Image (cartoon, rainbow, N blue to C red):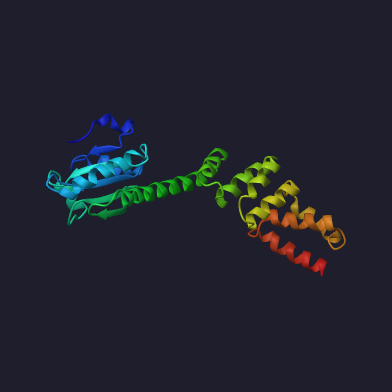
Amino acid sequence: MGIDRGSATLHHTMADVTDATFESEVVERSKTVPVVVDLWAEWCGPCKQLGPILEKVIAATGGQVELAKVDVDANPAVGQAFKVQSIPAVYAMKDGQIVDGFMGAQPEAQVQEFVDRLLLTSEQSELERLIEAGDEASLRKALEIESDNPAAVTALASILVERGDTDAGLALLERVPESAETRRIIALARTGGVGDDVETTLAELLPTVKTDEDARQRFVDLLEVLGPDDPRAAEWRRRLSTALF
């Protein structure tokens, strides 16, 4: 039992895990990659049907999910930790927590669904991590996972527009529905940013907004760039309403 310590550097998709190695091979490992724990015993017929199906489906993920097999007769502590009533019992672990599981032998289609769900949650958390990182390279990777993710699209479009890559930024926005943030980025593209003296610019534009459509559009764009949370925006919106009506 047990596996070679060097395995951390290899993509082992299957390991025989013992009471002694469970913490490192399953709990710690699940913080890097989802681990499926198969609790079985030599005398258990359904375990022998399920085992090869689990091995096949998990091997097909190419290391994106790993399998830990635990003989509960030889390793009672692991069985107790999972409060196992009957075997086969299968648990999915991620970030040190149980996230899914099933009891009893299952056909391959069910096992495939179980592993697919695990891959999906893994992909979602990777997506969230990339969006949180927020730099251009991370955001581009996020869009490879989900090309129309609104948070990733608007964050990348904002970066592109701010550096003058306006066409590329605006083209990206076509992937997502209109929102306060898409309007802000489009306004940013039109105005080239608000600059430090935005209030001076707004004050200069205000007398002409009623008669000059370009001035009115620029005024509205500058308010969009300030965004709904900027306290100055509410005051200038009020002044715009007064000027127009």
Answer left or right for 102 relative to 46.
right
The number of callouts visible is 0
Looking at the image, the residue that sits furthest to the top is 6
Nearer the observer, 164 or 11: 11
At horizontal 83% and vertical 56% (from top left) the residue drawn is 215
Nearer the observer, 30 or 226: 30
- In the image, is residue 17 above or below residue 79? above
At horizontal 72% and vertical 57% (from top left) the residue drawn is 223
Image coordinates of residue 125 in percent, x first then y, are 43, 48
- In the image, is residue 122 above or below residue 236? above
Nearer the observer, 7 or 135: 7
At horizontal 18% and vertical 40% (from top left) the residue drawn is 20
- In the image, is residue 31 above or below residue 233? above
Image coordinates of residue 128 in percent, x first then y, are 48, 48
Residue 104 in sight here? yes
Q: Which image quarter holds the C terminus? A: bottom right
- In the image, is residue 244 above or below residue 154? below
Image coordinates of residue 141 in percent, x first then y, are 52, 40
